Amino acid sequence: MTDTMTKAEWQTRAERLVFRTQPFIDGSFVSSSSEETFAPINPATGREVCRIAVGSAEDVDRAVKAARVSFQDGRWRKKSPLTKKSVLLRIADLIEKHGDELALLDVLEMGKTISNAKAELGFSAGFFRYYAEAIDKLNGDVIPADISTLAFNLLVSRGVVGAIIPWNFPLIMASLKVAPILAAGNSVVLKPSEIASTSSLRLAELATEAGVPNGVFNVVTGLGKTVGEAIGRHHGIDMLSFTGSTQTGRRLMAYSGESNGKPLLLELGGKSPQIITADMRSNIKGMVSQIMHEAFWNQGQWCVARSRLIVEAPLRDALVDALVKAAAEVVPGDTLDPSSTFGAIATTTQMERIQSYVTSAREDGARLLTPDFPVNGCFMSPMIFGEVTRDMRIAREEIFGPVMSIHTFTDFDEALDLANDTQYGLAASLWTKDLRRAHQAITALDAGKLTIRSTPGATEQSGFALASEGWGASGFGAEGGMAGLRSYCRLKAVELVS
Ligand code: ADP
């Protein structure tokens, strides 16, 4: 990987990039049964990135058959834990070796900045390393029984796992699904988002180079309503792991119910809060960049965006002034310029959706506190709205864009009530120096992932070992950590009676 490339050098790299554009089935790129193609559009330039095969239900069927054969004959599943571990570690090495290329693919298709895409590589490689190391540390339980019985729970692979991912962190999402799926000995059929498919295709190719046997890791490109639905309804898929919208997650529940009842892991939308208590007054300067990061990272296009700021009244004006000033300085920039930190919104459709929320906020009486910078193609600046009431659409619905709303509280119970006044429960942040309030919030907040801080500043945090599970409309099933590995295993009860 190169760390010192200039914008011109990235542009040259981008022009020379070779795109993988066909489904990856049984260890190689194959022609789709449909002749059609679709084109992801670079939102930063409005230009076609490449043309990708529109996969079909037939392609899904082919991929499932290849995955099934590979699972049945055990060419991956039956490998020793140490062999599997070394293969996953090699995938992580290859992600780093080809990091510039993988980062560029995500930049061109979904408009994040090259500096962010490069920073994200550490997560993708990290998931493979974490799950590589986890393979020989996951064990079942021996259960107390009478003297003539040996009773134990085995953790066995689930079989063929379908994985459907969104476009916001294409390579990270593919890695977060595929690493534990493979670590648990399964075979996988992955469907990337039609908006950003090429890093998944390249990842599958690199995994094969690393030693994943043919048929174990398949990718079918294409649309949600054809390829996605075919995966959701396929009788040969034993489990489905999905990240995306609540609406699609609920469709997948129906597909499962109407087909083979496959178990689901659903990581869906969010509308997450950040609560800030008045005792954080002396830390405003330090907090601002982290509050902004939690709300606006990836142009606000992440499911754990903590975009509802719930501030204790005495701190409100000082904190909001500092935030507005910082947000006004965020300039969306050329995505291939390494100095840009804020990129484009991924698609014109997504931009229209965000702007419809901005319009609704104005119509509902919220007040824009940041400068009213004009939208330029798929580029927009972060927006902060004050005078937001909890019934407004911008306070209730997931926007998936850089729009923050400010709420004020005088009583901590009111803050917790506001934070929980949502159908979602993915994440929540609390800034406080008050241990009693921190304690209260841990119990009271309905969210899968809580971050509680009393001081700003980076820490090493917990690496990859933390698992979380959404609540309400945010889905169910654990991702991350050892619990995330267990999600892709089935429990088998054994009684060995003499
Ligand atoms: P987003 O709005 O973030 O794109 P979606 O839920 O629409 O969220 O998409 C996430 C993933 O789900 C994408 O890979 C998309 O192609 C897929 N998808 C969309 N609709 C369906 C569907 N009806 N069945 C299965 N997958 C779908």
Image (cartoon, rainbow, N blue to C red):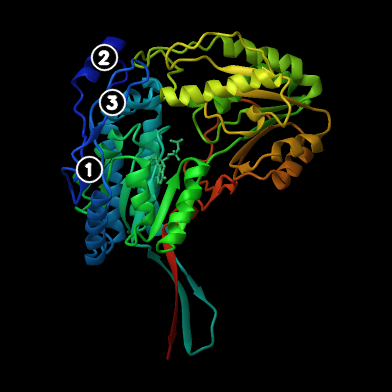
Q: CA distance from mark 3 to mark 2?
A: 12 Å
Q: CA distance from mark 2 to mark 1?
A: 27 Å
Amino acid at pointer 1: Pro
Q: Secondary structure at mark 1?
A: loop
Q: Quadrant of the N terminus?
A: top left
Q: Is residue 231 visible?
A: yes
Does residue 305 sit above or below 177 in this rendering? Answer: above
Q: What mark, if any, has residue 397 been given in the picture?
A: none
| Residue 25 as seen in the image, left or right of residue 409 | left
- Residue that label 1 marks: 23
Q: Quadrant of the C terminus?
A: bottom left
Amino acid at pointer 3: Asp
Q: Quadrant of ligand 1?
A: top left
Q: Earlier in the sequence, mark 2 or mark 1?
A: 2
Look at the numbered discs 3 and 1 and tell me whether their residues touch, using CB distance below 8 Å. Answer: no
Q: Nearer the viewer, mark 3 or mark 1?
A: 1
Look at the numbered discs 2 and 1 and tell me whether their residues touch, using CB distance below 8 Å. Answer: no
Q: Which image quarter: residue 91?
A: top left
Q: Secondary structure at mark 3?
A: helix
- Residue that label 2 marks: 11
- Residue that label 3 marks: 100
Amino acid at pointer 2: Gln
